[in-house]
């Protein structure tokens, strides 16, 4: 029973994709053209500046994934530049080993950089932002001090000669093209990652960490890969830097340089490739236009950073984002298409039941849940109602693995759910939404929904870097499924819009679409009707019933009696953490205590 | 030798502890760690040298001016770098705005003052002895600040208000406490403490712009290890840090002392992110 509208969905997604892909590639092609033809109009000195900009970008492109996408405040990335510069120089000079050929030295430096990138980055998994910022700063100081002290190898304060790359890269312009080529490759690779499920997962970690967990994104694995990549390219940039300087001392690697890299990204805008690229070019070239400013350059960067943070937190990328300045229709109705649910979810296998047995949990002296039994069966909507503070959301958080129950068991088909392994829930096809929608505001609605399907991608991080076939297949699959999910919840017309421009009710449906991407066996909804109009609540009910018909077990935490009684197959009522009643909607409606305590007579 | 390690270690530990308290006072009032804490310490040394050595002011006048400048910088920090980003605390923009402000001041100092360490004047006109004023002045300053803060928090109404804000910002505001002016006062107070640290430690650290990042890091170590917001933790951890650093300095040399401090810092933080004394619980969903 396919209507014409459903048939056009994937093709609309494709159209949307190819048109915006060309528009997005245009500035990069222009920069490529300028870069390739640069020797035609620049003198020798400008060649050095341009080479330096390319080298900086090799580093910044990788750091951009850490700072701009994953939102980790890594200030001291100059440490990796230093490391790469010394590794390459020392290996080619043969202070420690027999002399290496420069390319091999550069490759070894990249490997060393990857390892140290991981070491410097790892604290980010445990520490809060400011702590992490300080540790990277500490690393930057330490590396320089070690370079100064380890005289037999690094030459101490006297320094060491940088590598010399053989013909054809030994001349000024030859070396420029070498660096430019690497910069172009880095741009291409990071753009690939940015547009992949990994790039979206990084922004989810940055802006909506709990949603990332619920979508099955493993922060340690992902950040580990990104730190290694970022460390490797930073070390390569270091090797190139040493070659450009032709002689390096610890003085060359000041914290100012680190600040430049960091600020280039923020001026460019978080979550963008083009913005930080322009930012890097701008910051490298700026002092050259006004010689008296050279001494003041870091001062000016700092002023620029303050202005950007306070006035335009989105940076250059936000200024260039014309598409999202077009006004949206003001009268928008969300019309879900429950008929699409079956196509989206396919034939779900009978997943059995998600069971809570005698679960109890208290915070300090406050008892949040006290001996709760709950069974969510596949293909049914199970309502969980009760006054505020009765333990509904706590129950949901126990199932999701945020809290460990002090006694009792949570099991899926008889097997206990692991406590605290929150991202494992997605692999077990347990999806959820949140009381306050957790959305990546700067990403499009479509991208937000695609985050929900992260665990279904097959390609690895490296395959995404290089845009190999499996990566492209994943992307097509995720995009098509997400368009279908958006159509099912009635938001397909807003697919390309930045999510932070949406109304509250639209965000709620976006979250449901994201959860549906998992083809969940169990779907946990935390007050999905809060803030919705009466019409919207009615349509939400229809959607939930269609989801249950497809075989998903739905747990509905709600306050709206109409929605509960119209859609639920079974209802559990909580009061002060205890189960007050459980049964069919009809039984609950006539339960005297429930009416007294909660529903009102 | 042991004597010199202990006196230097305790003195420098007191300076770290004071910078740690500077972090804490700002944090308690706003839930914000500010990169300007170390900059305040640096300013204490540079301005002290500027007023007393270069401009020949009497020590007392120079001292009061330094404290006033610290308070002023604290207030400027609050207005420029903290207040505008408080409403979006979860985006951590404060890390960037306070970093920017700290860098602006550091770079300005480097260019307008000097990029080299400059001498700091002898504050008291007494002969150099074994246990010199450069060691006991930071200790005195640290003791004075601890006693002062304790009296303030325990025995004055403003102090109680500070505690209330630190405990629960929303509840304090609901009680009608003037949150904004209390926050500004806290930042001014933090400014005074930070500048005092740099001034009292001026003879040891010299008047040098590079002290800013150094103190930003080593001043934060006691906060991280002692538990954020805990002044007692900061003092204990600061003293331990100073002693450890000086001992390592003597035993294995400067660079490896820095590496050792850093390694210990990272390992302790990774093992106990909430600090050795603190405990943190946050509801996220």
Image (spheres, rainbow, N blue to C red):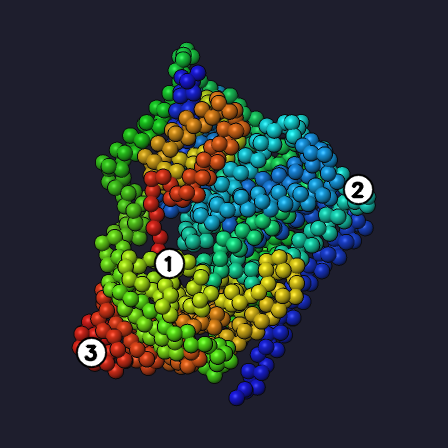
Task: Residue A148: give x, y in percent of width and height.
Answer: 60, 29
Task: Residue B170: give x, y in percent of width and height.
Answer: 31, 53
Q: Earlier in the sequence, mark 3 or mark 2?
A: 2
Q: Earlier in the sequence, mark 2 or mark 1?
A: 2
Which residue is disc 2 drawn over? A166
Q: Which mark is residue A419?
A: 1
Would you identify the image quadrant in which residue A289 lies? top right
Q: Which mark is residue A591?
A: 3
Q: Is residue A16 left or right of residue B59?
A: right
Task: Using a 10 Å C-alpha cutoff, classify the residue at mark 2 as few (fewer than 14 neighbours), some (14 to 19) or many (20 or more).
Answer: few
Pick the residue in front: B71 or A390.
A390
Residue at image position (54%, 28%) is B255
The image shows residue B46, relative to residue B160, as above or below, that is above
Pick the residue in front: A229 or A281.
A229
Chain ID for label 3?
Answer: A
Q: Earlier in the sequence, mark 3 or mark 1?
A: 1
Q: Is residue A496 visible?
A: no
Question: Marks 2 and 1, how far apart in space?
Answer: 57 Å
Q: Is residue A386 left or right of residue A113?
A: left
Would you identify the image quadrant in which residue A97 lies? top right
The image shows residue A461, relative to residue B208, as above or below, that is below
* Helix, strand or loop under label 1: loop
Tags 3 and 1 both on a single chain:
yes
Task: Using a 10 Å C-alpha cutoff, classify the residue at mark 3 as few (fewer than 14 neighbours), some (14 to 19) or many (20 or more).
Answer: some
Residue at image position (69%, 43%) is A106
The image shows residue A499, relative to residue B241, as above or below, that is below
Task: Using a 10 Å C-alpha cutoff, classify the residue at mark 1 as few (fewer than 14 neighbours), some (14 to 19) or many (20 or more).
Answer: some
* Helix, strand or loop under label 3: loop
């Amino acid at each position: 029973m396919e209507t014409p509208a459903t048939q056009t969905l994937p093709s609309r997604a494709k159209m949307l994709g190819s048109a915006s892909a060309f528009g997005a590639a245009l500035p990069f092609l222009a920069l490529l053209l300028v870069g390739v033809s640069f020797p035609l109009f620049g003198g020798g000195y400008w060649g050095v500046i341009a080479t330096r900009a390319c080298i900086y970008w090799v580093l910044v492109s990788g750091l951009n994934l850490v700072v701009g996408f994953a939102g980790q405040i890594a200030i001291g990335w100059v440490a990796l530049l230093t490391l790469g510069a010394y590794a390459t120089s020392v290996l080619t000079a043969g202070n420690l080993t027999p002399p290496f050929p420069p390319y091999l030295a550069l490759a070894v430096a990249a490997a060393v950089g990857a390892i140290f990138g991981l070491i410097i980055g790892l604290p980010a998994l445990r520490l809060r932002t400011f702590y992490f910022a300080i540790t990277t700063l500490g690393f930057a100081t330490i590396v320089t001090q070690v370079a100064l002290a380890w005289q037999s190898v690094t030459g101490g304060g006297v320094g060491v000669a940088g590598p010399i790359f053989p013909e054809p890269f030994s001349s000024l312009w030859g070396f420029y093209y070498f660096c430019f080529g690497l910069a172009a490759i880095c741009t291409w690779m990071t753009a690939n990652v940015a547009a992949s499920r990994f790039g979206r997962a990084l922004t989810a970690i940055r802006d909506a960490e709990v949603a990332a967990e619920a979508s099955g994104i493993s922060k340690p694995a992902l950040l580990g890969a990104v730190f290694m990549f970022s460390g490797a390219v930073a070390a390569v940039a270091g090797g190139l830097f040493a070659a450009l300087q032709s002689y390096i001392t610890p003085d060359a690697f000041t914290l100012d340089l680190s600040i430049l890299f960091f600020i280039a990204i923020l001026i460019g805008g978080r979550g963008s490739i083009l913005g930080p690229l322009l930012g890097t070019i701008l910051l490298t070239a700026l002092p050259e236009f006004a010689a008296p400013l050279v001494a003041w350059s870091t001062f000016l960067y700092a002023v620029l950073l303050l202005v950007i943070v306070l006035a335009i937190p989105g940076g250059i990328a936000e200024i260039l984002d014309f598409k999202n300045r077009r006004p949206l229709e003001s009268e928008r109705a969300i019309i879900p298409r429950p008929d699409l649910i079956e196509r989206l979810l396919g034939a779900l296998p009978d997943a059995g039941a998600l069971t809570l047995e005698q679960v109890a949990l208290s915070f300090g002296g406050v008892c949040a849940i006290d001996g709760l039994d709950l069974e969510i069966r596949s293909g049914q909507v199970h309502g969980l109602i009760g006054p505020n503070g009765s333990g509904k959301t706590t129950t949901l958080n126990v199932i999701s693995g945020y809290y460990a129950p002090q006694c009792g068991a949570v099991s899926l088909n008889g097997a206990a759910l692991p406590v605290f392994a929150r991202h494992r829930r997605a692999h077990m096809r347990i999806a959820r939404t949140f009381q306050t929608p957790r959305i990546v505001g700067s990403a499009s609605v479509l991208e937000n929904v695609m985050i929900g399907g992260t665990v279904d991608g097959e390609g690895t991080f490296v395959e995404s870097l290089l845009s190999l076939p499996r990566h492209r297949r994943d992307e097509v699959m995720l995009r098509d499924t997400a368009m279908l999910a958006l159509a099912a919840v009635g938001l397909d017309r807003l697919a390309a819009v930045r999510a932070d421009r949406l109304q509250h009710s639209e965000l709620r449906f976006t979250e449901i679409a994201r959860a549906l991407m998992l083809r969940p066996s169990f779907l946990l909804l935390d007050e999905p009707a809060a803030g919705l109009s009466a019409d919207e609540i009615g349509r939400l009910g229809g959607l939930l019933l269609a989801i249950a018909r497809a075989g998903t077990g739905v747990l509905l935490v709600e306050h709206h009696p109409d929605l509960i009684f119209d859609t639920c197959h079974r209802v559990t009522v909580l009061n002060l953490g205890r189960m007050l009643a459980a049964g069919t909607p009809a039984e609950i409606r006539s339960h005297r205590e429930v009416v007294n305590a909660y529903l009102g007579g | 030798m042991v004597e010199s390690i202990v006196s230097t270690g305790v003195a420098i530990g007191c300076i770290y502890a004071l910078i740690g308290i500077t972090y804490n006072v700002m944090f308690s009032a706003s839930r914000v760690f500010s990169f300007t804490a170390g900059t305040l310490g640096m300013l204490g040394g540079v301005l002290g040298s500027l007023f007393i050595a270069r401009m020949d002011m009497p020590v007392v006048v120079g001292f009061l001016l330094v404290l006033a400048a610290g308070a002023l910088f604290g207030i400027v920090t609050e207005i420029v770098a903290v207040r505008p980003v408080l409403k979006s605390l979860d985006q951590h923009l404060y890390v960037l705005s306070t970093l920017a402000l700290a860098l602006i001041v550091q770079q300005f100092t480097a260019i307008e003052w000097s990029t080299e360490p400059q001498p700091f004047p002898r504050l008291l006109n007494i002969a150099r002895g074994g246990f010199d004023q450069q060691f006991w002045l930071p200790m005195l300053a640290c003791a004075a600040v601890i006693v002062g803060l304790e009296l303030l928090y325990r025995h004055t109404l403003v102090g109680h208000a500070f505690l209330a804000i630190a405990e629960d910002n929303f509840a304090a505001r609901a009680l009608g406490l003037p949150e904004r002016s209390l926050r500004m006062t806290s930042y001014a107070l933090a400014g005074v403490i930070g500048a005092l640290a740099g001034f009292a430690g001026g003879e040891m650290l010299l008047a040098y712009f590079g002290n800013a990042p150094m103190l930003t890091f080593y001043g934060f170590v006691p906060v991280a290890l002692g538990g954020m917001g805990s002044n007692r933790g900061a003092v204990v951890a600061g003293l331990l840090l100073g002693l450890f650093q000086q001992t390592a300095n003597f035993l294995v040399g400067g660079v490896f002392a820095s590496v050792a401090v850093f390694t210990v810092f990272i390992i302790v933080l990774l093992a106990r992110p909430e600090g050795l004394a603190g405990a943190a619980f946050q509801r996220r969903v």
